[in-house]
Image: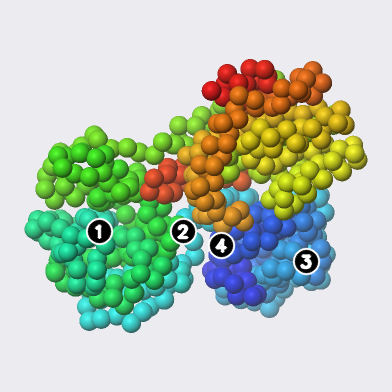
């Protein structure tokens, strides 16, 4: 029987991916495989390993074919792979090899066989279970490299420098974790500046800090410091200088501790995202399980308002408070923990909280509205960038036979208008996937349909700018091929859409002729199933429903629309 089974990338783009015994794993486009080619689905093939038989069963899930041992698989095909046999996620691209450890005995080799079982004619006997480790957005196979350290300190680099870990010589794993931010919590600048001017510009924040940490250590806590250090990523801070600085801080505190430096400019390790905590649990706590109820996190980025205490400025963000919320551990500010001050209620959390989105809300309002039509039509999608328009177009309309006309795909509005006209002339229905924030831009598309007597419907994505920002950050975490949306674009849509809201659709369009309507409801995001509920950024709550995330639409007649939009 095998002890382990891996999927190995033949081009060595990323570390081996573990295939747990009798547990399903989806392989396809995403951050784990570093595949960005859109022809490769996020769930391209489904794999599950049988350690006792030294066999991996494979099912083709994606619409574009994969190649298994030289034979093309289409959607629904099922086959088997043995040790060192290969699968190409696309023909001639993204080749992977199955590796069993230890290798199977020679008598385990199967006779020549047809690797394809068509269209589920033979049921898979191995029960399918979803691996919790592989399904979690923040659980990864860690690439850890030892670095040159100094006397009394061990340094490690994780994920090619996304995070650096310093562990003092006598620091050991514990079930209780006392975690702290560094800047503004353990230390501050000696100069009084916001950012340290050099490696020596620091001092312990409060005289009480060293004593409090020593008491925690004696009470059986492991002292952990978790700090975002974007300056390393952008070159403002040299890594060697940072290492010298934190070693001096540890010596000054004189208590065993472990420090996690999140050096990336984004990604899963940067607080308030929980990747660093998962790394601690998985690889950096001596295989000792962490008791979340007994652990806590302390930081100064608490979302406190101006004058939360007399003379105090507002906090620069609420990332530390969100980090604790994501971890479901107790949270303290430095003033509360080290000085014994009472917690303040003068703080703000992000405006958008996906936990408040009702997963059972109706798909459309009114419920009688249909997303698609059997007769030819044009659908205009309206909404801010990141509100879910492209997902709606690609997963609902395109599979239903609609032509997707999009400026992002075509390269410009004139080309998109041409695609719309050609598709309508060919008798096809079209979904236009643009922001359509301005009345004039919407009117040009409506006029093309009007000239051909084709009815138009309008679906408004009711996602707020805060929710769209959340979606934008979530795309970053899941390795989406979407370009990251810059902040000015959110403001630009709000400005132009608000200015033209009195005429959502051109008044010359007759409702009875063109069937114009404004849609409203919630759209399920099935590709986000099994994602954890997390706050993604300091000022954004990036939580995702454990079952599914939903975007909001609204449905009224075009005559009523001007009232709704005010």
Q: Residues within 10 Å of mark 4 (few under 14, many from 20)?
A: many
Q: Which residue is mark 1?
A: 194
- Residue 222: percent from left, percent from top: 23, 60
Q: Which residue is mark 2?
A: 267
Q: Cβ–Cβ below 8 Å for labels 3 and 4?
A: no
**SS at badge 4:** loop
Of mark 4 and mark 1, the one earlier in the sequence is: 4
Asked whether the viewer can see residue 553, the reply is no
Disc 4: which residue: 32
Vertically, is 557 above or below 225?
Answer: above
CA gap, disc 3 to disc 1?
Answer: 54 Å
Camera sees residue 527: yes
Element under disc 2: loop
The answer to whether the residue labelled 2 contacts the one labelled 1, judged by CB atoms less than 8 Å apart, is no
Residue to which mark 3 is pinned: 91
Q: Is residue 112 left or right of residue 81?
A: right
Q: Is residue 146 above or below residue 294?
A: below
- Can you give x and y, in whole percent of width and height, for residue 302 in the image? 28, 45
């Amino acid at each position: 029987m095998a002890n382990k089974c891996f999927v190995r990338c033949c081009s060595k783009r990323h570390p081996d991916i573990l295939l747990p015994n009798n547990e399903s794993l989806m392989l396809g486009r995403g951050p784990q495989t570093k595949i960005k080619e859109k022809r490769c689905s996020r769930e391209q093939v489904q794999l599950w390993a049988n350690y006792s038989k030294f066999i991996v069963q494979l099912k083709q899930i994606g619409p574009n074919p994969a190649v298994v041992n030289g034979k093309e698989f289409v959607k629904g095909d099922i086959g088997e792979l043995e040790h060192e046999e290969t699968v190409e996620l696309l023909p001639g691209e993204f080749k992977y090899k199955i590796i069993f450890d230890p290798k199977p005995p020679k008598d385990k080799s199967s006779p020549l066989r047809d690797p394809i079982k068509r269209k589920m004619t033979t049921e898979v006997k191995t029960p399918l279970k979803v691996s919790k480790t592989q399904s979690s957005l923040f659980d990864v196979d860690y690439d850890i490299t030892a670095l040159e350290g100094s006397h009394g300190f061990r340094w490690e680099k994780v994920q090619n420098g996304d995070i650096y870990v310093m562990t003092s010589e006598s620091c050991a794993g514990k079930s209780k974790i006392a975690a702290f931010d560094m800047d503004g919590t353990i230390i501050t600048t000696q100069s009084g500046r916001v950012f340290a001017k050099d490696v020596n510009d620091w001092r312990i924040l409060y005289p009480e800090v060293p004593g409090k940490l020593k008491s925690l250590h004696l009470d059986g806590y492991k002292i952990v410091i978790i700090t975002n250090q974007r300056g390393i990523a952008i070159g403002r801070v040299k890594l060697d200088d940072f290492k010298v600085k934190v070693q001096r801080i540890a010596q000054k505190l004189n208590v065993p501790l472990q420090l996690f430096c999140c050096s990336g400019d984004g990604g899963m390790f940067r607080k308030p995202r929980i990747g660093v905590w998962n790394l601690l649990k998985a690889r950096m706590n001596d295989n000792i399980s962490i008791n979340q109820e007994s652990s806590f996190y302390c930081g100064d980025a608490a979302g406190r308002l101006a004058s939360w205490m007399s003379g105090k400025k507002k906090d620069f963000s609420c990332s530390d408070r969100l980090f604790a919320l994501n971890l479901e551990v107790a949270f303290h500010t430095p003033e509360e923990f080290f000085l014994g001050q009472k917690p303040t209620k003068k703080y703000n959390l992000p405006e958008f909280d996906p936990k408040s989105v009702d997963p059972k809300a109706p798909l459309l309002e009114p419920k009688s509205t249909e997303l698609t039509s059997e007769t030819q039509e044009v659908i205009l999608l309206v909404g801010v960038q990141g509100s879910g328009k492209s997902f709606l177009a690609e997963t609902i309309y395109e599979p239903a036979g609609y032509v997707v006309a999009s400026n992002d795909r075509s390269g410009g509005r004139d080309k998109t208008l041409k695609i719309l006209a050609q598709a309508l002339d060919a008798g096809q229905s079209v979904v236009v996937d643009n922001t359509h924030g301005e009345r004039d831009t919407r009117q040009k598309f409506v006029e093309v349909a009007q000239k051909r007597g084709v009815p138009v419907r309008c679906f408004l994505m009711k996602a707020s700018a805060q929710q769209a920002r959340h979606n934008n950050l979530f795309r970053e975490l899941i390795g989406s091929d979407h370009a990251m949306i810059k902040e000015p674009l959110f403001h630009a849509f709000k400005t132009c859409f608000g200015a033209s809201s009195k005429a959502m659709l051109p008044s010359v369009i007759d409702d009875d002729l063109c069937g114009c309507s404004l849609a409203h409801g919630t759209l399920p995001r099935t590709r986000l199933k099994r994602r954890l509920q997390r706050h993604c950024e300091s000022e954004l709550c990036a939580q995702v429903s454990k079952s599914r995330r939903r975007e909001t639409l609204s449905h009224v007649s075009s005559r009523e629309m001007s009232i709704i939009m005010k």
